[in-house]
Amino acid sequence: MMPSPRLRLLAGGLLLASLSLPALAAPQHALTLYDEAPKYPASFKHFDYVNPDAPKGGTFRLNGSGGFDSLNPFINKGVSADNIELVYDTLARASLDEPFTEYGLLAKQIEKAPDNSWVRFYLRPEARFQDGHPVRADDVVFTFDTLIKSGAPLYRAYYADVDEVIAEDPLRVLFKFKHK
């Protein structure tokens, strides 16, 4: 039995209407510039170029030139210690063997709006500061606000398109953008 013309018209109209809606955002473990599938699955333990069986322990030394008067690499005044940024983790980490792809580091999942108007980070519950306190969304907001207000001017320029950073709950932080 064929559906009535009215039912077919309604179904066709609903199909066309659904195609005009933006795709719903879904949390994922990585973001790629062109929305292609990332190289590594959500369950990956290490990048291919990392040796998980490398020797542990010992002393790690880096060469630095000149002196320093600050351990804060984000300020404009003073000279920060060379390579001090290595002690800071970020929400996501770029893969060195995959261009334009970021994998969650402090964030276990990342979600972005289909129109690129916002990005949401879901923090890892196990993420901790060096003193053992958990990293929470309020910490991300505080860090961002402090960086914009008190950091070197280059950060204000770099993050100029960020309109607002919101701690939606203890493990979820939303970055809204001024432009799509």
Image (cartoon, grey):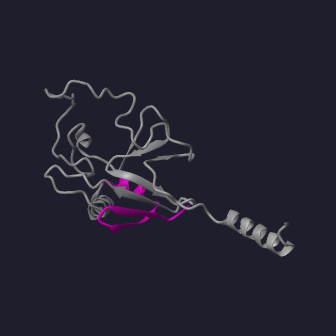
Asked whether 111 or 138 is in front, the reply is: 111
x 27%, y 63%: residue = 142
Q: Is residue 41 magenta?
A: no
Q: Can I make out residue 11 in this image?
A: yes
Quarter of the picture holding the C terminus: bottom right
Where residue 52 appears, x then y in whole percent? 29, 29
Looking at the picture, does residue 40 appear above or below residue 106? Answer: above
- Say which quarter of the image contains residue 176: bottom left
- In the depicted structure, whether residue 70 falls above or below residue 169: above
- Region in magenta: 152-180
Identified at 26% across, 25% down, the residue is 53
Left or right? Give the position of 67 relative to 127.
left
Residue 2 screen position, x and y as percent:
85, 66
Q: Nearer the viewer, residue 16 or 3?
A: 3
Quarter of the image containing the N terminus?
Answer: bottom right
Above or below residue 150? Residue 83 is: above
> Which residue shows up at 46% across the image and 51% down it?
28
Residue 43 relative to residue 177: left or right: left
Q: Examine the image and state in which quarter residue 139 appears.
A: bottom left
